Image: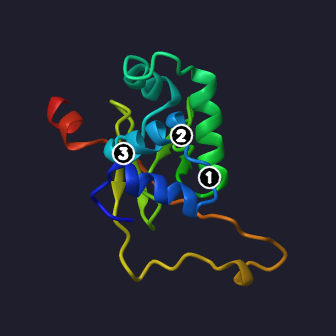
């Protein structure tokens, strides 16, 4: 996925993923692409409600569910309390700070091999997640 996003490239991305690009879907997808913070439904709602007064948490939740189902975004369960969402779907890992809760992308080295569907006997593998837990540099400096 490209780093530069505008309404037309986001619309085309959704169409390629077989998703009808409504105003709400475009807004949520654009938000995720522009905010690499792995937000929750609540965070997305709070940031979009002033721009789209008619948007609801239910609409955002249903949009995220559809985007994840169509593999347009990642649904991340690294945080035991809430699901977070990631518009960056290329292969990468995640790190969560056990103190402040910040979630960041972690690049994977080429030598890490994810299992392929055909290599996991008796299972139909859909996805693989790599999560790291620890303390970010800001929290380490504070303590």
**Of callouts 2 and 3, the N-terminal one:** 2
| In front of the other: 136 or 104 | 104
Real-space Cα separation, disc 1 to disc 2, in angstroms: 9 Å
**Toward which corner of the image does residue 140 lie, by quadrant?**
top left
Q: Residue at x 43, y 53 (%)?
A: 10
Kindly report which numbered mark, 2 or 3, lies closer to the viewer in this rendering. 2
Left/right placement of residue 113 relative to residue 101 reads right
Real-space Cα separation, disc 1 to disc 3, in angstroms: 36 Å
Q: Are marks 1 and 2 in contact (CB under 8 Å)?
A: yes
**Toward which corner of the image does residue 15 lie, by quadrant?**
bottom right
Residue carrying label 1: 19
Measured as percent of width and height from the top left, residue 3 is found at 29, 60
Residue carrying label 3: 134
**Of callouts 1 and 3, the N-terminal one:** 1
> Circle 1: is it few (<14), some (14-19), or many (20+) Cα within 10 Å?
some
Residue carrying label 2: 25
**Residue 73 position (above or below residue 96):** below
Q: Residue at x 41, y 83 (%)?
A: 111
């Amino acid at each position: 996925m490209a780093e530069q996003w505008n309404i037309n490239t986001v619309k085309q991305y959704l169409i390629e993923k077989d998703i009808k690009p409504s105003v709400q879907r475009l807004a949520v997808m654009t938000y995720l692409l522009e905010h690499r913070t792995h937000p929750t439904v609540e965070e997305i709602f709070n940031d979009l409600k002033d721009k789209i007064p008619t948007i609801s948490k239910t609409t955002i939740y249903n949009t995220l569910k559809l985007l994840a189902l169509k593999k347009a975004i990642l649904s991340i369960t690294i945080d035991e309390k809430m699901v977070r969402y990631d518009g960056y779907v290329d292969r990468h890992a995640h790190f969560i700070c056990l103190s402040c809760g910040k979630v960041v992308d972690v690049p994977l080295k080429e030598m890490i091999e994810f299992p392929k569907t055909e290599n996991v006997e008796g299972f139909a593998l859909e996805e693989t997640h790599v999560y790291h837990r620890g303390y970010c540099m800001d929290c380490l400096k504070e303590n």
